[in-house]
Image (cartoon, helix red, strand yellow):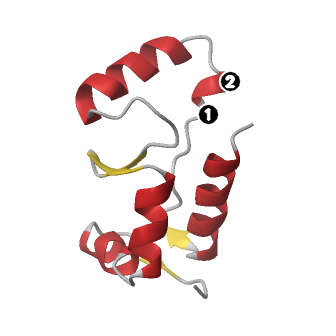
Amino acid sequence: FCRYSRRDKDLLARYGLNPVPHIVEVDLRDDGDIINRLLTRLTDQATFPNIILRGRSLGGYDNLQHLHETGVLEQVLEEAGVHGTGNV
């Protein structure tokens, strides 16, 4: 259990995203260490959560919260073709 992952999942849920995000629980997978190494190589980020949108890493908890707090997250999502129906 990672409180930062939980907070990011909760934040994204409040957006009511369509399509719904695909969440990979790396710590619950047998191949989690392999996924971690691959994501680190692809995104230069070795920690989780690692929010990836259309193949681009938005970063982790601090990054996602900053995008949300500055009002940029909704725009980033919409530009990627992800629309929200929630109240944020």
Vertical position of residue 7 compared to residue 50: above or below: below
Residue 27: give x, y in percent of width and height: 64, 25
Residue 2: give x, y in percent of width and height: 69, 40
Q: Quadrant of the N terminus?
A: top right
In this rendering, would 87 be left or right of 52?
right
SS for dot 1:
loop
Residue at the spot 49% in from the left edge and 67% down from the top edge: 65
Residue at the spot 51% in from the left edge and 54% down from the top edge: 61
Residue denoted by label 2: 28
What's the distance in space between the residues labelled 1 and 2, CA to CA? 6 Å
Quadrant of the rendered structure where residue 75 is?
A: bottom left
Residue denoted by label 1: 25
SS for dot 2:
helix
Tell whether label 2 touches label 1 (CB within 8 Å): yes
Please rate how many residues cluster around mark 2, counting C-alpha atoms within 10 Å: few if below 14, some from 14 to 19, many from 20. Answer: few
Residue at the spot 33% in from the left edge and 20% down from the top edge: 38
Vertical position of residue 49 compared to residue 25: above or below: below
Residue at the spot 67% in from the left edge and 63% down from the top edge: 10
Q: Amino acid at mark 2?
A: Leu
Q: Nearer the viewer, residue 39 or 55?
A: 39
Q: Amino acid at mark 1?
A: Glu
Q: Quadrant of the C terminus?
A: bottom right
In this rendering, would 45 be left or right of 23?
left
